[in-house]
Amino acid sequence: MSLLQNTNSLLVICDECEQRFYRMRETDHTPDFFEEVKPYADQSHRAIADWATDMKVWIKLRKPRYVHDVQIDSLKDSMTQFVVQSFYKETGKKRFILSINAARYTLQTVVNAMDEKGEDSSNE
């Protein structure tokens, strides 16, 4: 998969987390950690970590104007947290939504930087 496709996959994860957050609150569901939370979190965390590593290489090679290592580290940390938090109705809504919106903003900035640099589906 290309870096652009992986970035779009993380945007999908953001959407899934937000939808799950509202669904868990509506249904008053408490998930089974080992059956529901852990498998999804492990897969997502792996995708986030791989993307962050690839992004840092891309940043060094392409030197985009509005994307920096510190943003990638921040996004990685916040996404790994809200992926798990999305399963629990006790999660505070304001901070959760702000975290997702910040992640979306950074991911969209990355997509825009790739468009600006003329990236297509190739992975560098």
Image (cartoon, grey):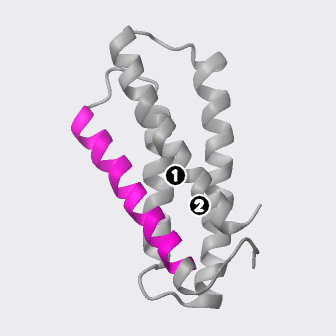
Mark 2, secondary structure of its residue: helix
Above or below: residue 82 compared with residue 111: above
Tell me if residue 78 comes above or below residue 120 in the rendering: above
Residue 118 higher or lower than 82, as above or below: below
Dots 1, 2 in contact, CB < 8 A? yes
Q: Amino acid type of disc 1?
A: Leu
Q: Which mark is residue 7?
A: 2
> Which of the labelled discs sits on residue 121, or is there none?
none
Q: Which residues are magenta?
A: 93-114
- Residue 68: in magenta span: no
Q: Position of residue 116 (x, y in %)?
A: 52, 85
* Badge 1: residue crowd in 10 Å (few <14, some 14–19, many ≥20): some
- The residue type indicated by label 2 comes to Thr
Q: Residue at x 45, y 65 (%)?
A: 108
Q: Nearer the viewer, residue 10 or 82?
A: 10
Splitting the image into 4 quarters, where does residue 41 fall? top right
Name which quarter of the figure residue 95 lies in: top left
Res 65 seen here: yes
- Per the image, the residue denoted by label 1 is 11
- For mark 2, does the 10 Å Cα neighbourhood hold few (<14), some (14 to 19), or many (20 or more) residues? many
The N terminus lies in quadrant: bottom right
Overall secondary structure of the magenta section:
helix
Q: Residue 46: x, y in percent?
A: 68, 49
Could you say which is closer to the camera, residue 2 or residue 40? 2
> Residue 93 at what x, y percent from top left?
26, 33
Q: Please provide percent x and percent y for residue 102.
A: 34, 57
In the displayed structure, would residue 76 be above or below residue 92?
below
> Residue at coordinates 66% horizontally, 51% vertically from top-left?
47
Give the farthest residue toward the left: 94
In the visual, does 75 lie left or right of 99? right
